[in-house]
Amino acid sequence: MTQALQVDLSGRRAFVTGSSRGLGLASARALARAGADVGLLGRQPESVAAAVTDVEQHRATPGQRVMAFTGDLATTEGVQGVIADATRSQWDIVVNCAGVAHPGALAEIDPADWSATMAVNVTAPFLLSQALSVPMMERGWGRIISVSSHSGLRPSRGSLAYSVSKAALQMLSTCLATELGPHGVRSNVICPTIFLSDMGREFWSDLDVLSGKIEQIPAKRLARVTELADVILFLASPAADYINGAVLPVDGGLFAGRPAASGVTLANLDEAELSPNQR
């Protein structure tokens, strides 16, 4: 898909977590197309290497660097290892895109799953922001962009740990905005509703259930991953210099209110991203 948003990030460096696939990878492509050097972080060296090859094809100029980082954000030791590698460079933009979900109601949640959810979704963004924001403040310019979820704005049935972690990520982002804002660093968070990343396709393979969810969205479709990446690109751009502490729903109007039913029926998963007149 052609990149719709025109942004110039030449000379900037962007570090993107969870960027071996899904929204993280789409965001890395968008940042590379805008001229930024990009650091990709994932857990598996093979997946990260493949993502580097992918993102290199989207560079605005051949001289841009696309760098590979590996590490497990589920442990403090893993995050500290990532920080040790990442701080060898200075980053202007950090995109906290890595996330995990362990579905379950209160009585079903394993404490280990709770801890893993908080580690990846909250603690890792905190530690990375703490370390990587220092040179941003010294230079007087920076962006920290975190990917939360609509589930962090409104409880989502069966996703207690995930919803709590995403609400905490939103508060972390706004706290960073107030503390880092005077130093030229902007911190914002986006809250998508369902989108068909690899994880989304796994969770929402039941077309009848997904159709019911789309019924609740005024736009009557899901966001495309590229649309979400465009929002991240905008928040990274100079055009967003006066946007700080925003908690931005990117949900087709879901948070604004649920419309009357209109009989959404999906023939396949890809139709979930199409407008009603395109199905």
Image (spheres, rainbow, N blue to C red):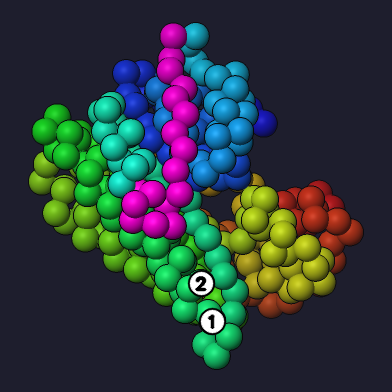
Q: Please tell me which residue is depicted at 14% across the width and 54% down the height of the picture.
A: 179
Give the numbered dot on residue 113. 2
Q: Which residue is mark 1?
A: 109
- Which part of the image, by quadrant, shows the N terminus? top right
Q: CA distance from mark 2 to mark 1?
A: 7 Å
Q: Tell me if 53 is positioned left or right of 131 in this view.
A: right
Q: On screen, 21 above or below 270? A: above
Q: Residues within 10 Å of mark 2 (few under 14, many from 20)?
A: some
Residue at 86% across / 56% down in the picture?
268
Residue 211 in percent (x, y) is at: 77, 68
Quarter of the rendering containing residue 139: top left
The picture places residue 11, in percent across and down from the top left corner, at 32, 18
In what element is the residue under mark 2?
A: helix
Q: Nearer the viewer, residue 272 or 127?
A: 127
Q: Is residue 64 magenta?
A: yes
Q: Residue at x 75, y 51 (%)?
A: 274
Magenta residues span: 63-79
What mark, if any, has residue 184 been given in the picture? none
